[in-house]
Amino acid sequence: MYINTLHLTNFRNYKELSFDVPCSVSVFWGNNAQGKTNLLESICFLATTRFSRRVPDREIMNWHSLADTIAFARVAADVVKAERNISLEIILRPRSLAFEDTGPSALNKQTKVNAIGRKAVDYIGQLNTVMFSPRDIDLITEEPSLRRRYLDITNSQIDRSYLRGLQRYNKVLSRRNHLLRHIAAGHSRPDELQFWDEELIANGAYLIYRRKGMLAALQALAEPIHDELSAGKEKLALEYVCSLMENQEAGPEDIEKAFGNALASQREKEILRGQSLIGPHRDDLKFLINGIDMGSYGSRGQQRTIALSIRLAEAEFMMNQTGQAPVLLLDDVLSELDAQRRRHLLSKVTGYEQVLITSTDLDHFPGTFLDHGEVFEVSDGKIVS
């Protein structure tokens, strides 16, 4: 799987770009704030309809385009896959002339496959990517919502049933919370929760089961990678922290039963609080080294090595699940690594079909590495070979 041609219109600092992406390793270098990260983010966005980091909607579109009669941004690509070639396209338009982040989204998003409009559940997964970034360390150190988001995005790229379940779960969760507040105010009866409880359990249990399965597969792949990166000094383990139960080996039926019991035990507290207090929206992920939680006690070096191990494992996991290698996006990660880890990372990623790497300094690449790929300079939203 690889991108043949990438097209950008009014995307971030790219006013207009049509770029033939090499099917190999490509290095994009230049000063900061020239568009290197934006280039990789456009591909991540095209694959998942989301950025790898929080970007306000008003900053996605090139600000000059807002003065156009019909303001819009477009990200598109021709993608070569084993079974067939496809074209992907996302068109963004402001929902209002004010164009402010006043609601869930200030942009109207239209996704297309081969020029035909598709819902997100039928769009996501057409192109698979794994993005490496210096911000990956936040996955280990920051709030649980980032880790849940990571689990959801990775699973959604390879499993449409997961994405459907996630969408349904979020809708049920919102309506159930609304009902809980009505019950607390005396406008509804507690027995009205039964239908929403059943829906929450059915969809939530599937999400938990798939998350656990993904983490088990990731650990099997990440453990030897981390062992090599740490010279055998550290044993990496991934632990899913479930708000329902501690049993890591539980099957779908066990999870559903535990979910039902937990809801029953928390009923009064949930009504009092007016929100659902248990379920996959409350779960977390821990990264352990030799049994110690690295989110709380790890050094920056340890956390950075874990992040690298997880991303490399994620790429292998996606390839194992889909039979096709994902497109790898490495955003200025070499500057964060020592020479040993740089060599290890570059030796691993060069085995993939298409790799895009950004850097501010070509000296970060060891030996003759640059002789085996193509090098492009990025300056003010333009790419020069």
Image (spheres, grey):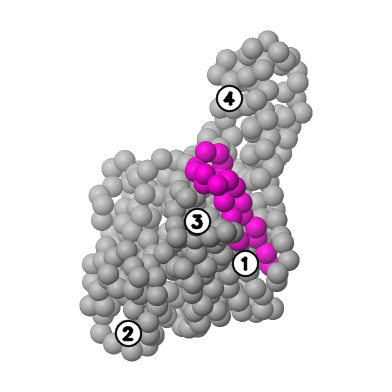
The answer to whether mark 2 and mark 3 are in CB contact below 8 A is no
Q: Residue furthest top?
A: 186
Q: Disc 4 and disc 2: Cα gap in Å?
A: 54 Å
| Residue ID at (59%, 20%) | 274
- N-terminal label among 1 and 2: 1
Q: Disc 1 and disc 2: Cα gap in Å?
A: 31 Å
Residue type, mark 3 in image: Leu
Q: Is residue 136 left or right of residue 365?
A: right
Of helix, strand and loop, which one carries label 2?
Answer: helix
Residue type, mark 4 in image: Gln
Foreground mark, 2 or 3, reads 3
Q: Nearer the viewer, residue 219 or 207?
A: 207
Q: Residue furthest bottom?
A: 371
The answer to whether mark 4 and mark 2 are in CB contact below 8 A is no
Q: Which mark is residue 370?
A: 2
Of helix, strand and loop, which one carries label 4?
Answer: loop
Of helix, strand and loop, which one carries label 1?
Answer: strand
Foreground mark, 4 or 1, reads 1
Residue receiving disc 1 = 89
Foreground mark, 4 or 3, reads 3
- Magenta residues (range): 91-113
Q: Nearer the viewer, residue 150 or 73?
A: 73
Q: Disc 4 and disc 3: Cα gap in Å?
A: 39 Å
The answer to whether mark 1 and mark 3 are in CB contact below 8 A is no
- N-terminal label among 4 and 3: 3
